[in-house]
Image (cartoon, rainbow, N blue to C red):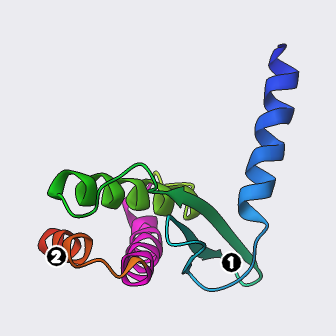
Amino acid sequence: MSHCSKSLALAAVMATCFAVPGAYAQSASGQEIVVRAHAGDTETRSQMVSYADLDLGHEAGARALLMRITGAAKLVCSPEPRELKDAKPYRACTRQAVDRAVADVNNPAVSALHHERG
C-alpha cells in the first residue's frame, strides 16, 4: 500500500471515529464504551473502546480498561499541545472525557483505580 493510500485509509478511519456527536461517553453494549470530547464549539470527537476481552473483576483487567480509556481520551482531545501555556484546556478535556467514561462503565474496580490516580 502506498504512503498516499495509507494516509487516505487513516483519514477515513479517523473521520469515522470523530464524526459521532453526543455526550462525553456512553456505553454502547456493556462490552464497549464510547469516549467523547468536544473539540472547539461545534466538533465532537469520539473513540470506541472495547473491553470484551477484559475481566473487570480482576485488577489487571480494570487497569487495562482504564489505560484504554485514557488513551482514547488523549486521542479525542488531541493534538497534545507543545507549549505549556496551552496544556490546561487539553488536560481538562482528557480529565473530563476519562471521568465520564469511567462513570459510564460503572465498575467499582475501574472507578477505584481512577480515583486512586487522581
Label 1 secondary element? loop
Q: Which residue is mark 1?
A: 40
Q: Residue furthest left?
A: 116
Quarter of the figure with the N terminus: top right
Q: Answer with left or right where residue 62 lies relative to residue 33.
A: left
Q: Amino acid at mark 1?
A: Gly
Disc 1 crowd, CA 10 A, few/some/many (<14, 14-19, 20+): few
- Extent of the magenta region: 83-104
Please check the rendered image and state whether residue 20 is part of the magenta-colored stretch, yes or no: no
- Report the number of discs: 2
Q: Position of residue 83 (x, y in %)?
A: 43, 56
The mark found on residue 76 in the picture is none
Q: Position of residue 5 (x, y in %)?
A: 87, 23
* Quadrant location of the C terminus in the rendered image: bottom left
Is residue 80 left or right of 110 when viewed as pictured? right
Whole-angstrom CA distance, mark 1 to mark 2, is 31 Å
Nearer to the camera, 105 or 41: 105
Locate residue 21, reporting x and y percent.
74, 79
Q: Disc 2 marks which amino acid?
A: Ala
Residue under the point 86% across and 34% down: 8
